[in-house]
Every structure is written in structure tokens, then in C-alpha cells.
Image (cartoon, rainbow, N blue to C red):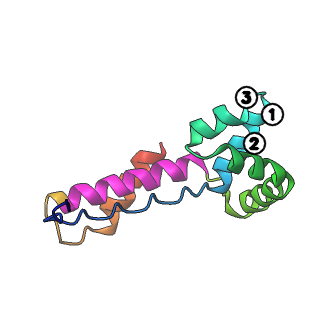
Amino acid sequence: MKRPAPTKVPAPTPKRPRKMLTIPEKVGLLDMLREGRSYMAVGHHYGINESLVCHIKKEENNIRMTAAISCKNGCNCHNKTIMRMESALALWISDCRKKNITRHYSGTKIIAFFYLLIT
């Protein structure tokens, strides 16, 4: 006896997206291995296979060299006062946008605002 054909064809499940770790994540993974954690525990922490952890461990020298080079190019040490000023300016601009303030403020008001931040 033949089985009846299904009325609806089940939709194929989409493939699981590939897990790509960034360089800082790989450095953190390598640090966890240096602390003595197992390959399985580290892989479970990052959601990757144990074999990928072994592959990253093999490439440890290249990863650490890349991290050192990219950190040298990407790290800019800012003055704390400038950082506070930039965050306050961003907050002030967002408040002006929320209040629909479109007119231009005079330069003296802006200078007074920044002077209050610096002191």
C-alpha cells in the first residue's frame, strides 16, 4: 500500500551562520588557554568547536603579532577633558534635536558652555 503524498512540503531550515571571532576575541581565547582552561571549555564559552580552538592555538604567534600591530594603529589616547567635552557636546546636540531647536546658537553661548565643562 502506498503512502499518500504530503500536502505541504516542509521548508528547508536555513544554515547556521558561521561564527567569526575578531582579533581581540581570539587573543582572549588564547589567554584563557594560557590560564589552563581546556579546549572544550574555551570552545563552549565562545560557541565554537574544539577543533577551531586548536587551530587558533596553532596560529597563536600570528594572531598576537596582528593584535599588537592593530592596537598600535588603532589606539588613540585622548585627554580626559576632551573626552568629557565630546560626550557633553553629543548630549547637548541630541537634546537640541529632541526639542526641535534648529536655530544657530551664538558663539558666546557655546564657548561659555564648554568653559563650564573644562572647569
Q: CA distance from mark 2 to mark 1?
A: 6 Å
The amino acid type found where label 3 is placed reads Arg
Find the magenta span and give its range.
Answer: 79-97
The amino acid type found where label 2 is placed reads Leu
Relative to 110, residue 104 above or below = below
Q: Position of residue 7 (x, y in %)?
A: 13, 65
For mark 1, what is the residue? Answer: 34
The amino acid type found where label 1 is placed reads Arg
Q: Position of residue 38 (x, y in %)?
A: 73, 30
Q: Nearer the viewer, residue 72 or 7?
A: 7
Q: Is residue 42 left or right of residue 107?
A: right
Q: CA distance from mark 3 to mark 2?
A: 10 Å
Q: Secondary structure at mark 3?
A: loop
Crowd tier of the residue under label 2, counting other residues whose Cα lies within 10 Å: few below 14, some 14–19, many 20 or above: many
Contact, mark 3 vs mark 2 (Cβ under 8 Å) = no
Question: Which residue does the image show at 63% across and 46% down from the upper left?
Answer: 49
Res. 94 in view: yes
Q: Nearer the viewer, residue 18 or 36?
A: 18
Q: Position of residue 14 (x, y in %)?
A: 37, 62
For mark 2, what is the residue? Answer: 30
Quarter in which the N terminus is drawn: bottom left
Asked whether residue 68 is drawn in magenta, I would say no
